[in-house]
Amino acid sequence: MNSNTEDILPINGTDYVELYVGNALQAAYYYQTAWGFQPLAFSGLETGNTETASYVLRQGKITLVLTAPLHKGTYIGEFVDKHGDGVRTVAFWVDDAEKAYYDTVGRGAKSFMEPVTEQDADGTVVRSGIHTYGDVVHLFVERKDYNGVFLPGFKAWAPAYEVEPLGLEYVDHMVGNVGWNEMNVWVKFYEDVLGFKQIISFDDKDISTDYTALMSKVMSNGNGRIKFPINEPAEGRKKSQIEEYLDFNHGPGVQHIAMATDDVVTTVRELRRRGVEFLRVPATYYESLTERVGNIEEEIEILGELGILVDRDDEGYLLQIFTKPLEHRPTLFIEIIQRKGAKSFGKGNFKALFEAIEREQALRGTL
């Protein structure tokens, strides 16, 4: 499938990613200060919303919504209590939110939100939604008749505080962790309900260390703009990172968001300067790098200094790096990726990466 018209569910791209958090104002400050996201819109008491506070930030084509409850006893509060701060909504930008809803529910999706038309002086937006793994939902957002800043009910948010963006451009992929023997269930869901195709598969022989193992399948929509690797644990000698995630997240959820940049060295150098912490692989990783991936444009010494990993496939190479968990729970993290032709996901880095994760797990006492 190469064109959107062939999809049973045409998707233009990721509309936004919403995180439920304990304190939306402080979370917004973090993503501005550390990550360079720019303030865009706000909904809360000042806009007539008496239930929630949401801060919307954008960098490139990545839109983050950070939402917290204004009262006790809410679903959002229960979500944060259960999972910690984490991804609740992965919203798709579509041309017809009503059709997307009825088609996917007709193919077996569990309804989350029937189509609703929301409007203000800037026009109308239609939104609908379905459930996916864990407590994550997909919303369909139709905004062709809307010229407002984000969604009806939101007002422009332009604080005096300004930070420089870091060159993050779009969501490259988002990874879901699901429970034992659930990977193929959700692969089938994305195939049957949303019309995605499996483009890559990794088993425990591809993704294993002396202690831990996992399996993964990568699902993609027809135009390739949405890619969802889905991981499940595999039997290993000790507890895998996926099991650790499931324990602390209390079930399946989004493990990480991969954000693309055109200059990973500059982006990561500035993120480090702003205090973002990344996983480190041993210096020996860089000693055999050229042997493994061939010649690359970047200076290996600089990549080693920053901890950036490199992998090659038939189409080219990629550079990637992973943060430590963004919360006190070892759950959600962010990947920074720069693709130089490569369409893959860094299989050659898995062993070094997972050994780095295991070192962190050992410090946490959860290996």
Image (tube, rainbow, N blue to C red):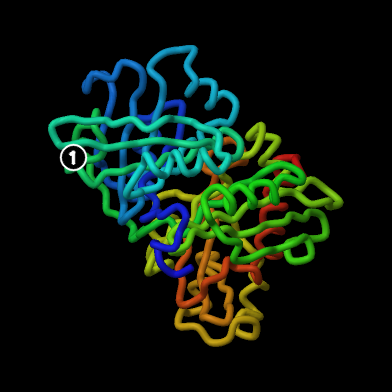
The residue at the far top in this view is 72
Residue 256: percent from left, percent from top: 54, 49
Amino acid marked by disc 1 = Gly
Nearest the eye: 279 or 248? 248
Residue 224 lies, with reference to residue 130, above or below; the image says below
Disc 1 target residue: 148
Q: Residue at x 53, y 55 (%)?
A: 195
Dot 1 falls on a residue whose secondary structure is loop
- Which image quarter is the C terminus in? top right
Q: Residue at x 51, y 58 (%)?
A: 227
Can residue 31 be seen at all in this image of the molecule? Answer: no
Side of 307 relative to 54 (left or right): right
The residue at the far left in this view is 121
Side of 44 relative to 26 (left or right): left
Can residue 287 be seen at all in this image of the molecule? Answer: yes
Residue 31: percent from left, percent from top: 38, 43
Instruction: Indicate the quadrant where residue 113 lies.
Output: top left
Instruction: Indicate the quadrant where residue 161 lies.
Output: top left
Q: Residue at x 21, y 30 (%)?
A: 119
Nearest the eye: 195 or 342? 195
Residue 253: percent from left, percent from top: 59, 40
Side of 247 relative to 152 (left or right): right
Residue 273 lies, with reference to residue 326, above or below; the image says below
